[in-house]
Image: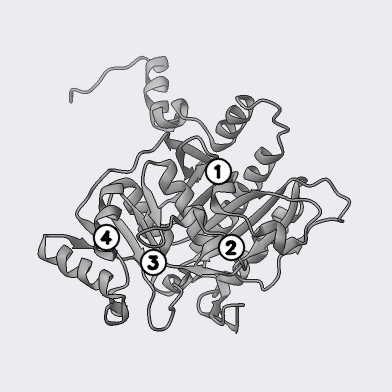
Amino acid sequence: MAQGRVLSRSSFIRWWAIPMSLSSTQQDSITLQSHILASEARQQNASGTLSWILSALSISAKMIAANVRRARLDDVLGEAGSENIQGEVQQKLDVIANDILLRILAARDGVAIVASEENEEPVIIGSEDDDQKYCILFDPLDGSSNLDVCGAVGTIFSILRNRSGLSAKDSLLQRGTEQVAAGYILYGSSTIFTLTVGDGVDMFVLDPSIGAFIRVATNLRIPNANKSYSMNEGNRLSFPQGHQDYLHWAQSNGYSSRYAGAMVADVHRILLKGGVFMYPPTAKAPAGKLRLMYEANPMSMIVEQAGGKAMCDASLAIQDVQPTDIHQRVPVIMGSTAEVDKVLSFLK
């Protein structure tokens, strides 16, 4: 008779059930919802409103992630046949993601104003007499042109306190230093939710088997240096001379180029690995291409909360910019402090 492992019936049942039990990660980790509630408990006079809004963003992220996964099957790739306020051709999933965020956030108490990169005007929720506390700004699907080739895309959001007594636009025109919270969701090989509420950066990964975001990193710190840069070098000939000089120096000193074509994907890699992300002024976009309120400010808050640096130029931090328009654009240099400083040394 062939020899084999001998188990009693009860031992066999326990042994066979091991693969079906929760993994150690699922057993030991904290969900995004639990993390939000624990953060709320540490704040004096917390009303729970911000937690309610962050919960809405997590639900939106799951819905958008599901649409991204099924984009080819549901035939929602390609252009929607319309343009956004910036004159850019919208992708079908731009519109879908935008609608999801607008619909879910509008249903949450505490949301006074919702503003999207895709819409010309902000949306006021409720009446002027409502005591609503927060304004939410977002880029619903950053890098959406990557969708046709199964590249990474993401959602970026910024949360500000509402300033009552002002028009919607005037209430939104706050410096990045006034942000209450910021974050991004990366839709790639996994769905990642990265969040800061001003006390460090935490990262969560969506576990589809239980439908929850699980915390995988807390108080994340960006490496101080890494010999890599991320930028669209196709525009190099129209960069300011300082940026061209930096590129020449970097390429002469063993730096690697990494560019995914989506700010979320590029900054996410730098947040974990270090390096510098740049979008300089160009001939086509002399003021810069990235939007201050929807992209640059929230990503700057995340980078700086993780110990990095985020600048427009050699003298102006992104979060110190006083916005004059909700669709304002700025140049961007952000990432590891040492690498950002190296770029700035060429701009001076």
Let me know if residue 272 appears in the view. Answer: yes
Q: CA distance from mark 2 to mark 4?
A: 24 Å
Let me know if residue 152 appears in the view. Answer: no
State the quadrant of the C terminus: bottom left
- The residue beneath circle 2 is 323
- The residue beneath circle 3 is 151
In the rendering, at what x and y percent does residue 120 appear? Answer: 67, 73
The local secondary structure at tag 2 comes to loop
* Relative height, residue 50 to residue 333 (above, below): above
Q: CA distance from mark 1 to mark 3?
A: 23 Å
Badge 3: residue crowd in 10 Å (few <14, some 14–19, many ≥20): some
Q: CA distance from mark 3 to mark 4?
A: 28 Å
The local secondary structure at tag 1 comes to loop
Q: Are marks 3 and 4 in contact (CB under 8 Å)?
A: no
- The residue beneath circle 1 is 211
Give the residue type at disc 4.
Answer: Val
* Relative height, residue 33 to residue 145 (above, below): above
Which dot, 1 or 4, sits closer to the camera? 4
- Residue shown at 48% from the left, 37% from the top: 214
Q: CA distance from mark 1 to mark 4?
A: 42 Å
- The residue beneath circle 4 is 343
User: Can you tell which mark lies on residue 37?
Assistant: none
Between 110 and 337, which is closer to the camera in this rendering?
337
Between 228 and 342, which is closer to the camera in this rendering?
342
Give the residue type at disc 3.
Answer: Gly
In the rendering, at what x and y percent does residue 279 appear? Answer: 37, 68
* Relative height, residue 213 to residue 128 (above, below): above
